[in-house]
Image (spheres, helix red, strand yellow):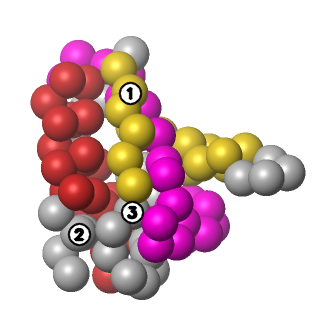
Amino acid sequence: MVSDKVVIKNPTGLHLRPAGLFCKTAMQYKSKITVYKKMKNEEVNANAKSVLSVLGACIKSGDEITIICEGEDEETALLDMVQLVKDGLGE
């Protein structure tokens, strides 16, 4: 299992289009990919391969998320997912 923290830079956060790109990228890997977000009163985990799960996490611009990858291609998956977020999720 590998993980890394990254801050959402794009101004609209993970709305439908960037969430779709995020999930499409995650689905290219065999590893289980989870997004973790800690809020004031709760912790949210989302399946990075499910658009509804990612949208349900309500990830906004400026939020810090942790991307957790578990599986045979976890290292590559983590690098690509973190780079996707750092690049602004296509926006």
Q: Residue 3 carries which label?
A: 1
* Label 1: which secondary element: strand
x and y, in percent, of residue 13 in the image: 44, 75
| CA–CA distance in space, label 3 to label 1 | 16 Å
Disc 1 residue type (three-letter): Ser
Q: Residue 8 carries which label?
A: 3
Q: Which of the 4 image quadrants contains residue 89?
A: bottom left
Q: Which of the 4 image quadrants contains residue 55?
A: bottom right
Q: Which mark is residue 88?
A: 2
**Closer to the camera in the image, 75 or 73:** 75
| CA–CA distance in space, label 1 to label 2 | 19 Å
Q: In this view, does 15 lie above or below 46?
A: below
x and y, in percent, of residue 24 in the image: 25, 61
What range is drawn magenta here?
51-73
In this view, the residue farthest toward the right is: 41
Q: Residue 65 carries which label?
A: none
Query: Residue at 47% of width from left, 66% of height from top?
Result: 62
| CA–CA distance in space, label 2 to label 3 | 7 Å
Indicate whether residue 61 is drawn in magenta: yes
Indicate whether residue 90 is drawn in magenta: no
x and y, in percent, of residue 32 in the image: 39, 32
